[in-house]
Image (tube, rainbow, N blue to C red):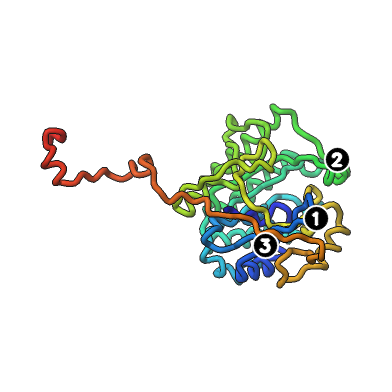
Amino acid sequence: MILSVSRRTDIPNYYSEWFYNRIKDGYLYVRNPMNAHQISKINLSPEVVDCIVFWTKNPEPMFSRLDELDAYTYYFQFTLTGFGRDIECNIPHKKEHMIPVFQKLAGRIGREKVIWRYDPIIFTDKYTPEYHLKAFGQIAHELNGYTSKCVISFVDLYAKNKKNMDALNSYSLPERELGAFAAQLASIAGANDIKAASCAEAIDLSACGIEHNCCIDKELVGQLTGCKIQAVKDKNQRKECGCVESIEVGTYNTCKNGCAYCYANYSHESVLQNSKQYDVNSPLLCGTIAEDDKITERAVKSLKDPQLTLWDKSNTPLQIPQDLIRVHADLFPI
């Protein structure tokens, strides 16, 4: 299985100690957001966890205990944008702090395991296309050699973020202008040895040099593990999303980043209330187990296929036993 840690909240930034303790104990609980009394117990054994995908705006709190993940394959989706604190109110200064954090992480675990996310892209009177191109270029220059891929997306409106987007007077670009803007991003990324890709976008930007991306990517997981991954598209994600199936371990209404575009929090008050229940030793993130909760162990298994196909083996020279050549010399003219 692949663990998503987490689309719902920034576990590396705020709850890394809890996650490390869960790794140590070998399991965690996840409450079903659609049925509050259903709790799944997830086995975290390295034998069944093929890869951990971390989503974060600041992984620095994880650094001191990264060696506890040595038995696991993992990579980071690291969001680093040009927004100020008017949109990302609790993120440290990008140039002074977050870019060095990104560089330090990539230097420690390898550039292929740190994916740069410049998303979502929001256009406002302040954050114009010209502003984004300048900010993107500055960040790309600093990350040259520290990442292989940059993922972009344009903000999506949900009931949970529409009010904030309206307050920002956000707007969309006509498709032709959007394509020209995307092409400039791809050019800037390419000039810094970074491949540009899109996340869950309905618009096809391939002509601009930006391919559709899979954030939970079985090809990348296969490269990192050295095995083929037998996984299918995640049916719980949007049609445009190319991610493969994973188990999400986060909890809604617990992220303290305070981003205006967030779809995972109902309100600031909900986050404060839930985060008060945080217990680093609890198997459940920011919650307690009630008498009428039902805990069920989820059936999980490795998605690895360790068997090489003939196509895989074709990358190595075919070795023909000499005795076979001698016996069937007529079939192997030399």
Contact between labelled residues 1 and 3, with CB atoms less than 8 Å apart? no
Residue at the extreme top? 176
Q: Secondary structure at mark 2?
A: loop
Tell me, yes or no, if residue 101 can be seen here: yes
- The x and y percentages for residue 57 are 69, 57
Q: Residues within 10 Å of mark 3 (few under 14, many from 20)?
A: many
- Sequence order check, earlier mark of 3 and 2: 3
Residue wearing tag 2 = 169
The span from disc 3 to disc 2 (Cα, nearest Å) is 31 Å
- The x and y percentages for residue 216 are 60, 48
The structure residue drawn at horizontal position 56% and vertical position 69%, both measured from the top left corner, is: 68
**Residue type at mark 3?**
Pro
Residue wearing tag 1 = 36
The span from disc 2 to disc 1 (Cα, nearest Å) is 35 Å
Residue wearing tag 3 = 12
- Sequence order check, earlier mark of 3 and 1: 3
Of circles 3 and 1, the one toward us is 1
- The x and y percentages for residue 309 are 39, 43
Contact between labelled residues 1 and 2, with CB atoms less than 8 Å apart? no
Contact between labelled residues 2 and 3, with CB atoms less than 8 Å apart? no
Q: Is residue 290 above or below residue 205?
A: below
Judged left or right of residue 120, residue 206 is: left
